[in-house]
Structures are given as structure tokens and as C-alpha cells.
Image (spheres, helix red, strand yellow):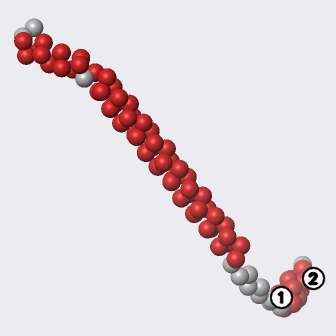
């Protein structure tokens, strides 16, 4: 091994604990960000569903009344002709 490689190895060995702590910290932050993202997505989906359900419940129902006696009489007349 060249002297440069030996020096680099010694430097990495001396800073190994710091490097491990930094890697652990980064991994923990990535996990926290992933969990936060999942919570936000689930909350957004839940809020959207809640909004659609409450909008459907608050919708006004319009009732239309139709006089169908003419149709009933016509159909009854067709049945008697046979």
C-alpha cells in the first residue's frame, strides 16, 4: 500500500465513530421524513373522503311529482286489446 492509502485509512479509522454517528443521524432523519410523508398522505386521503361524504349528506334532494295516470291508462288499454 502506498503511504497515501495508509494515511487515508488511518484518518478514516480515527473518524470512524463520527462517521457512524452521522450515518445513523441521516438514517433516522430519512425514516422520520418517510413516516411524516405517509402520515400526510393518509391524512389527505381521509380529509378528501370526509369532504365528499359530508358534501353528499348536505346535498339537497329535489323531489319531482309526475302524474302518470295517462301512461297507466294507455298501458291498461294495450293489455285489454290482446
Q: Is residue 63 left or right of residue 80?
A: left
Which residue appears at 55% of the width and 52% of the height? 42
Is disc 1 in contact with disc 2, using a CB cutoff of under 8 Å? no
Residue reaching furthest to the front: 14
Which residue appears at 30% of the width and 27% of the height? 18
Give the class, few, some or many, for how many residues have Cα within 10 Å of label 1's Cα (few <14, many ≥20): few
Is tag 1's residue or tag 2's residue first in the polypeptide sequence?
1
The number of numbered badges drawn on the structure is 2
Give the class, few, some or many, for how many residues have Cα within 10 Å of label 2's Cα (few <14, many ≥20): few
> Toward the viewer: 61 or 19?
19
Q: Is residue 33 visible?
A: yes
Which residue appears at 45% of the width and 42% of the height? 32
- Where disc 1 sits, the SS reads loop
Residue 68, numbered circle: 1
> Toward the viewer: 5 or 54?
5
Q: Is residue 77 above or below residue 27?
A: below
Residue 78, numbered circle: none
Figure quadrant of residue 61? bottom right
Figure quadrant of residue 48? bottom right
Q: Which residue is mark 2?
A: 80
Q: Position of residue 57 (x, y in %)?
A: 71, 73
| Quadrant of the image containing the N terminus | top left
Q: Position of residue 5 (x, y in %)?
A: 11, 15
Figure quadrant of residue 13? top left
Which residue appears at 67% of the width and 70% of the height? 54
Q: CA distance from mark 1 to mark 2?
A: 19 Å
Q: Is residue 55 left or right of residue 67?
A: left
Amino acid at each position: 500500500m502506498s503511504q497515501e492509502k495508509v494515511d487515508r485509512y488511518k484518518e478514516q479509522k480515527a473518524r470512524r465513530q463520527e462517521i457512524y454517528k452521522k450515518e445513523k443521524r441521516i438514517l433516522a432523519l430519512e425514516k422520520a421524513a418517510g413516516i411524516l410523508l405517509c402520515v400526510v398522505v393518509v391524512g389527505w386521503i381521509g380529509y378528501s373522503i370526509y369532504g365528499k361524504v359530508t358534501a353528499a349528506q348536505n346535498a339537497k334532494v329535489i323531489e319531482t311529482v309526475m302524474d302518470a295516470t295517462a301512461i297507466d291508462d294507455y298501458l291498461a288499454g294495450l293489455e285489454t286489446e290482446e
